[in-house]
Image (cartoon, grey):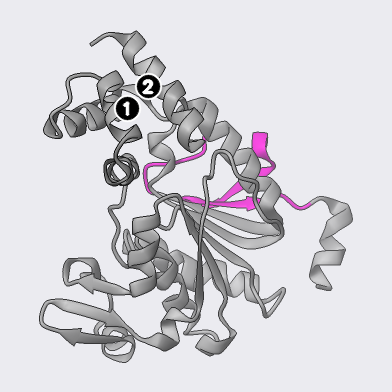
Amino acid sequence: MDSRDYQEFIQNIKNKTGIDLALYKEAQMKRRLQSFYEKKGYRSFQNFFIGMSNNDQLLNEFLERMTINVSEFYRNIKRWGVLENEIIPQLLKRKRQLKIWSAACSTGEEPYTLALILSKFMPLSEIKIIATDIDDAAIAKAKAGIYSERSLNEVPMDIKRKYFTTNGNLHYISDELKKTVQFRKQNLLSDSFDEKYDLIVCRNVLIYFTEEAKEQLYNKFSQALFNGGYLFVGSTEQIFNPSTYGLKNEQSFFYQKVLSNSNAGALNNA
């Protein structure tokens, strides 16, 4: 495959959509997109881009294919147990109203899992979670709150009965639970972040980015955290030098923003 063809494609996509494919691991992204355009009958990235420029539906399919929407409730359930039993209680000792962000939330299983865990500590009416993703189709599905049986494999039966309605093989999230999450479109690599989050969850996404892009995101996440707040990453996304980003490894896959002495007293009084 002509590497110039792909490099020109990267530049054209960046100009058209603002998405920089150069920040994704090249071999993985190339394979994924080449498989897609060949199925659509194209023979090169250049021809594929021309096709997308004249077909909005094809462009939307490309954007969906570029993103990775594989998720389920309580994915890697032991990690969620650490969040429930150790991290959340620690945060709630300092403040009652937590500011929480599910970054690259895909089809919504992750932020709704956060809400289900928080429901054990407070009424749903007090829970507010921001959830963002780059994929409009994923966000639309998340807002609909309709999931297959596979997505709910790890959901405890009492939770399933309380917050889901089942019709055939589909499970519908209750309106009460839906109201806890506010979904927004966001490009993690190019958009600015809000600040003073107590908890940021970004799992099973960073593995697709280059080391340069990861460093950029770790810095942005750290800056977005409240002092003492946590970044929760996926089971294959260990941060090897967290101090570089003002973080420390508190638990496996949980990184806490380091407190300076000058801020410690203020936080305890928050």
Dot 1 corresponds to which residue?
49
Q: Is residue 201 above or below residue 192?
A: below
Q: Based on the displayed image, in which of its 4 quarters is residue 156 positioned?
A: bottom left
Q: Is residue 244 left or right of residue 179?
A: right
Look at the image and tell me whether residue 206 can be seen. Answer: yes
Check if residue 236 falls in the magenta segment: yes
Which numbered disc flags the more N-terminal residue, 2 or 1? 2
Q: Identify the disc placed on residue 237.
A: none
Mark 2 and mark 1 residues within 8 Å of each other at the beta carbon = yes
Q: Based on the displayed image, in which of its 4 quarters is residue 110 positioned?
A: bottom left
Q: Is residue 121 left or right of residue 234?
A: right
Count of numbered marks: 2
Question: Which stretch is magenta?
Answer: 235-259
Task: Please rate how many residues cluster around mark 2, counting C-alpha atoms within 10 Å: few if below 14, some from 14 to 19, many from 20.
Answer: many
Look at the image and tell me whether residue 241 can be seen. Answer: no
Task: Please rate how many residues cluster around mark 1, counting C-alpha atoms within 10 Å: few if below 14, some from 14 to 19, many from 20.
Answer: many
Dot 2 corresponds to which residue?
9
The three-letter code of the residue at mark 2 reads Phe
What residue lies at 41% left-to-right and 68% top-to-bottom? 81
**CA gap, disc 2 to disc 1?**
7 Å
Q: Based on the displayed image, in which of its 4 quarters is residue 32 positioned?
A: top left
Q: Which label sits in the foreground, 2 or 1?
A: 1
Using the image as rendered, state which of residue 250 and residue 18 is in the foreground. 18
